[in-house]
Each structure stands twice: as structure tokens, then as C-alpha cells.
Amino acid sequence: MSEHPRAATREAHDRRFWWLVAAAVGFAACSAAWLATHPGSERSSIALDEISETVAPLVAAAICFLVARNPRAMARTAWVLIGLSALSWGLGQADWTFREVFLGESQASLFPSWPDVGYVTAIPFGIAGLIALPAFRGGGRRISLLLDGLLMVGGALFVSWATVLEPIYASSSAGVVQQVLSLVYPLGDVFMGTVMILALSRMGGRGRQPFIFLGLGILLTTVADSTFAYLTTVQNFDASNPADVGWTLGYLLIALGALRAMTTPKGEERPVKQTRWRMALPYAPMAAAGLVVAVDSLRGVRLDAFMLWDSLGIVCVVLVRQYLLVRDTRSLGLQLQEQNRQLDHLVEERTRELDHSLEGLREANDRRKGLLLRLVTLQDEERRRLSVIIHDDMLQWMTVGHTRLQLAQRGITDAKLGASLERADDAVQASISRMRMLMTELHPQVVERGFTTALEQYLEQVERDGDLRCTLEGGFAEEPSGTVATTLYRITCEAVVNARKHATESALTVTLSDTRDGYAVCVRDDGPGFVPEGTGYSPTGHVGLSAMRERAEALGGSWSLHSRPGEGTRVEFCLPHAPAISAPPGSGAVLDEELLAAVAGLGVEVPNPTHPLTVLTQLPLASQVDAIEAEALV
């Protein structure tokens, strides 16, 4: 069923229900007016009063049983017991009505009599039904509820006896059984009303509505029973009293509550958080009883036997409740200790597993850093070899070619041929310049000239090219050397290259400083800036940022990037005085399988070992010359 038809059906049910509520209240009001004014004969008023009091509980019992048969209804067991209570009361009232209306027996002869068996039997059924409500699921809660109810009844009875009931019963000429029954009815109703108040204080949501009507019905029957007890005690009970409408309307409201439960599916009841006033509720009548005792003591009034026994009962209930509280607290403490022990055991197991995993991660990370360091070392060695090859072989041959072209130009008299030789010589000189630049890029003379000097020359070259306005600030107390110097230089140059690409014609500042553990470099520009990716690595299709970070981490250092649109870019990195991790052994000219796998995992293309330049690094010098000539012929 879609949501809209379901809401429409519920709205129609609500509308019919509230019409029934209005009808029940209207009937009770009319009955009360009839009994108060007696527009007809006395016998007709008695018949209306007694028959309505008989029909209302029987209707309530029938609807309660229908609710209990509905599998979708909530608190089915509770409604069965409440239905039995209403049925018992209705059967007792039916006997009373038959005797009074049809047999003509007087009210004085009917109390006490057999109908009282039905009335008294209704009380335990009603209490059991209320204790079975969803708010008190669990044996511990129901015992606590029973004790709380006894506390409230004991306190209320103490106050009522001291203020109202004791003078009335002392002056009454009724018999003992009549007085006991007159006291049992309101006490039973008070106990049920107490349980109902505790139940409503623990409920919430739409599922609370049926039990509100149930509580109102119990309240009205309590008023009617109390009025009956008072009037019979003072021998002033009328057969058709307007207060009797409390029984009729009370059971009609119980029937309406059961009817409401038929349209309230399971799951719509919602428990309410127990606030301080809800927990203090059972002790309110006890506080009132204590106040009465204090006032009587100031007035010099002594407690009679009934009040003493009532006080003793209250003390016993408090002691039992305290014992149960201590027992439950101790049980919860033991459960908490066991749970803490199990939790500690689980934490120890998880901690050992985590330590083992962390140790494995540390080993893997150290291995990775070692492989990165080895990769950086091999790259630098390979670059150096290529630079040496270009210098000792190719550059020499190009220099020889340049010399021979100059000698050839001197013996040439043909102007056209001389111009061709001149152009060829210019091309050779340009190639020599490019080779020298390539040598510098492959193997900058950082170690030979010093890092600071090499960096100054590089920044001067960048500024001469007109791309950036470069400034070098600060310095190192001790010049770096070896792999650290080379890595510092290459990361700085990579950062400058990125600035040349993305911050052209901007001001660039390189700051050198010493830290406690190593060397720190900051490269910042006032270019347009950008929004870095969260990973700190290069975006797809670029490798510059990743290369800088990996070079720094390979030596045990750190690297960071800071940039925002319109605020320029700042690259900061720090390297230790010496590599934190040594390269694995066997870092020769040939990459092993483990290093090849590590390089491939970094997303870097693995060099082809059959590349001509790689072959040249492993050939003797004479063979290199032959190879160059062979390449030239091809």
C-alpha cells in the first residue's frame, strides 16, 4: 500500500475514533444529569444506572479480547488480563443489577454480597494486566514496578488515613467486612492508577495513546470506588448516585483505549528516557507521609495502630527494594568486570596484531626507502656515465670535426663551397654547445664546485633567460656533499623548472637554512598559484611533484607543497646530513629484478637495457668509437 492511501485510512480511523469518544462522554454527561435531576421515577433511574454500569465493563471486556486476537496489536497479553478484569467486574455488576433491579433487593442488603466476589477478583487481574504492559518488559522491571507501586500506595494510604479515612471509619457503624471491602476497592484502584502512571512515564510516541485512555478509565473508576467507600461508610449511599457514572465512563474509556490499540500496530511504542523526576515519582507519596508525621508530631498526635502497620509495610518494601538494588548493582558490577576483562583481552590481542602489522609496515617502508635510494643512486651514476661518454667521446669527435672544418675553410677558394663549410661549422659549434649543456644537466658539477656555487650559477642562468627574477637567500654552515648535495640540487632545480612553467616573469626566492637534523630549502614564487591535489603527488600525466617527494623520502627527508590561487606557490623540503637509509648491497650498473619491480610500481618507465646509450656505458672506449662510427654510417 502506498503512503498516501495508508495516511488517508489512518485519518479516517482517527476521525471515527474521536466521534466514539465524543459519544461516550456525551452519554456519561446525560446519565449524570439524569441521575442528578431524576426526571423519571426512582426505579427508572436505578435501572439506567445499574444497566449502564453492567453493559460498559462487558463491552470493554469484549473489545479487549478482540485486541488480544489481533496479531498486529501491541501488548496482547496485557489486554487479555485487562479484559478478564473488566469481565469479572461486569459479571459482579450483572449479579448486582439483577438483584437490585429485577428482584428489588435494597442496596444495604447487597453490600457485602456475592457480587463483591466479582469486584474483588477484578483487582488482581487488572494489576497483572498493567504489569504486563510493554513499558515493564523483563522480570527485574516488573518486580521494581510492583515495589514502586506498593510504596506509592502505602504513602497515599498513610496520608489518606491520617487526614480523611481514620475519622470516617472511627465514627462508622458498618461491619468489619464492609469496612474492609470499602477500603480494598479504592486501594486496588489506587495501586492500578499508580502502576498506570509509572507505565505512562516510561512510554512515548503514538503507542502511548491507548494507555492514556486506559489510565483515564482507571482514574474515573478510582473516583467512583472512593466515593462509594466513603458513602457506604457514613451510611449515606444512594442507589442512583451521579458519581456512579464514573464506573460507566471509566469502562467506556478502557474500551476506547482497547479500540485504539487495534489501530496502533506493534513498534509504534517508544521508550522514554528516565529523567530524575520519573525516578523520584514513587517516593513522592512517601515524602507526603513524612510531612504528615512531622505535622502530627508537632501537634502532639500519636500514630494509631493502622498507621504504624502501614509505616512498617513501607519500611519493609523500602528494605526489599534496597536489597534488590544492591543485588542488581553487584551483578552489574560483576558483569562490567567480566566485560572489561574480555575487552582487555581483545585489546591485547588486537594490539599484538597491530604491532606485528606495524612492524611489517616499517620493514616494508624501510625496504621501499632503500630501493628508492638505490634507484636515485643508480640514476645519478647512469647520468654521470652518460655525461662522461659525451665528454670523452662524442664531444671530442665533434671538436675534431670543428677543427677539421676550420682547416678546410682555409684551403677553399670557392665562395659557395666556403659558405657551405661555414654553415656546417656553425652547426657543429651549436651541437658542441648543446652537448655541454646536456652534460651539465646530466651531471651538474655540484660535488666539484659546491652546492651553493652550482645553485647560484643555475639561478643566474635562469635569470639571464628572462623567465624569472631569482634571489638566493641564506646558506648552509657546512656544504652538503655526495648524494645529499646532488639530491638537494636536483629537487631545487625541479622546483625552479615548475616555477618557470607556471609562474613566468614572477619573482622567485630560494632560501637555504640549517636545521637540527639536516638541510632545509624553501623555493617560493609570487605566481598565480593553484589548488594542489590532496595526495601531494603529481596529477595524472605529470611527474615533477612526485619525483621531488620521492627523491626527498629516498634519503629519509621530507617534502611539502603549499599553494593557493592568487597567493603563489611554496615548496619546502629537508634532507638529513647523511642518507637515513643505506642502499641495499649490489647496487651495480645493472638493475636487479627487485629494483625493476619497484620502479615499475612507482609508475616510472623502466629504461630499456638495449638502448644504444646504455650499451655504450658497458663498452670499452675503443668499442665506443666503433659504435659511434657505425651509428653515423646508418
Image: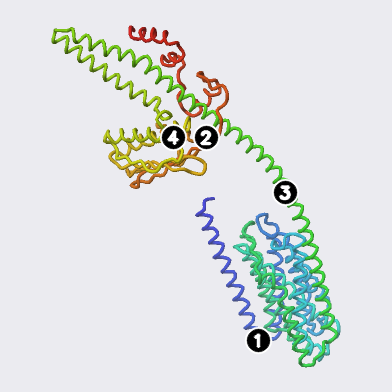
- Report, in whole angstroms, how far the alpha carbon at label 2 lies from the one at label 4: 12 Å
Residue underneath mark 1 = 38
Judge left or right: residue 84 versus residue 450.
right
Marked residue nearer the N-terminal end (3 or 2): 3
- Report, in whole angstroms, how far the alpha carbon at label 1 lies from the one at label 2: 113 Å
Q: Is residue 577 above or below residue 154?
A: above
- In the rendered image, is residue 540 in sight? no
Amino acid type for the residue under numbered disc 1: His
- The numbered mark at residue 578 is 2
- In the rendered image, is residue 556 in sight? yes
Q: Nearer the viewer, mark 1 or mark 2?
A: 2
Q: Tell me which colouring the rendered structure shows.
A: rainbow
Q: Nearer the viewer, mark 1 or mark 4?
A: 4
Q: Nearer the viewer, residue 425 or 159?
A: 425
- Report, in whole angstroms, how far the alpha carbon at label 3 lies from the one at label 1: 79 Å
Q: Nearer the viewer, residue 225 or 63?
A: 225
Residue underneath mark 3 = 344
Q: Nearer the viewer, mark 3 or mark 2?
A: 2
